[in-house]
Amino acid sequence: MENQIFELQYAMDTFYFLVCGALVMWMAAGFAMLEAGLVRAKNTTEILTKNVALFAISCIMYLVCGYAIMYGGGIFLDGIEAFDLAGVLSASTENGFDGDSVYSGASDFFFQVVFVATAMSIVSGAVAERMKLWAFLVFAVFMTGVIYPLEGSWTWGGADVFGMYNLGDLGFSDFAGSGIVHMAGAAAALAGVLLLGARKGKYGPNGEVHAIPGANLPLATLGTFILWMGWFGFNGGSVLKLGDAASAHSVAMVFLNTNAAAAGGAVAALIVGRILFGKADLTMLLNGALAGLVAITAEPSTPTPLLATLFGAAGGVLVVFSILTLDKLKIDDPVGAISVHGVVGLLGLLLVPVTNADVSFSGQIIGAATIFIWVFVASLIVWGILKAVMGIRVAEEDEYEGMDMADCGMEAYPEFVKG
Amino acid sequence: MKLVTAVIKPFKLDDVREALSEIGVQGITVTEVKGFGRQKGHTELYRGAEYVVDFLPKVKIEVAIAESSLDQVIEAIAKAANTGKIGDGKIFVTSLEQAIRIRTGETGEDAI
């Protein structure tokens, strides 16, 4: 009888990873729609191509070597198809009904791989409208095959950082990846943007910032809501267990807090935008909701609902000012990715010790620095090599004509007369 | 024959179309355009960056009419499109040299 209960737990926890993984996979649609909505019509096909292709590349590279680098195990997921009931039952007995979950390794890979794609997707928004499609895809191969997996191994994987120190021992914790996924993606994005330069016409000679409005705000809004919903899988699945009462309640709190933080971030950004600009700015509202989500991602289970809302609101306020600041620094980020995921990702990490006594500020800072420095420097090197070998920026004429024709040979809105 | 071109506010299109129908005008061509006259542009903010809104959406209608209906048509359009506020638009009248109905080959006033 006890074995049957363990089998049911295995089934439930495996299923839970799969469903949450599917929700996080759905975030890829969210990113694609958000980015497609915030770029100009002439660059829409290209960004959609980037988003679909990077998702596929992430899945493949993580399967080839990324997962092995991050968690050990075989290249090409060697052995993952094996099922050993006796092993499952003995592990369950050892952990106990209330202990760590036992689940299919395949479901673990599935849940992990969609996080890789999320990290990679953050980069595509920041470099939009002027980066060569193929240079970006080559970078994706390295980011998802090596750069992200290595920093993932030092964090969730528990390995020592190049053998020097161990982040877990230093009190570092990042529940679902404010730093490990979001700030890492933003670090890679920042490296790319610095080497790429701003879009033509974005900044004037005397520091003026010119608006380049997005072509499809309904898509951007849809993308944001899709990301919001997918995030329930992102944070919810990171509880890592569903199959006992305490875990189920924890999952419920995570869903609740995740949602509260998004709401807090949205309202805060809306109000800040109203105060600064005199009118409601939909794009800031969207970024605010996402910032709220990023802010809570490092620790969605321990805060009270009110605190979760306030943490989200802090993210919403911070993201608006960060977007404005980056423009002042002439760092061109068409969708606000570096602000939403990088700046607020760091905030998310630093908020953890406020409600989780097992985590130290110093541990969070060391962890944040480790992740950022590794990803930023490694990305800078890869971007730099790509820039030297094949160039990362499209030709000026292609940028003016639009990347849809230059890189893809097809328009996203072919029947719309260009105004 | 005359070609009457009018640039009007987009939400006035239905009123103008109805008014023209009432006086017997049978055909109309409509294009979406942008423009400004003495209605000055203004600035808006997008993510904190200022941009000038010079060109406002307008609708351009073109009707080909017999010269005998010209005054009627002008009055109908002007009355229907008028809001009394700036940006109401303009009516232009040009001479129409020839008109041909493609289906039947009729020309001149038989074609309009």
Image (cartoon, helix red, strand yellow):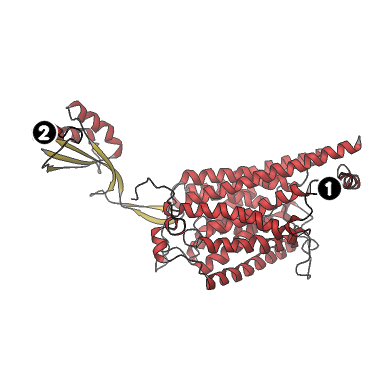
Q: Disc count in the image? A: 2
Residue B43 screen position, x and y as percent: 36, 53
The chain that hosts pointer 1 is A
> What is the secondary structure assignment of the residue under circle 1?
loop
User: Depth check: A59 or A203 in front?
Assistant: A59
* Disc on res. A100: 1
Q: Residue at x 86, y 36 (%)?
A: A5
The chain that hosts pointer 2 is B
- Which residue appears farthest toward the left when viewing the image? B68
User: Depth check: A293 or A70 in front?
Assistant: A70
User: Depth check: B18 or A343 in front?
Assistant: B18
Q: Residue at x 67, y 67 (%)?
A: A374
- Viewed as shown, does residue A416 lie left or right of A236? left
Image quadrant in which you'd find residue A140? bottom right
Q: Residues within 10 Å of mark 1 (few under 14, many from 20)?
A: some
Residue A377 screen position, x and y as percent: 63, 70
* Disc on res. B109: 2
- Cα separation, mark 1 vs mark 2, equals 88 Å
- Which residue appears farthest toward the bottom when viewing the image? A388
Residue A100 screen position, x and y as percent: 83, 47
- Viewed as shown, does residue B41 lie left or right of A369? left
Image quadrant in which you'd find residue A247? top right
User: Does any portion of residue A261 appear in the rendered image?
Assistant: no
Q: Residues within 10 Å of mark 2 (few under 14, many from 20)?
A: some
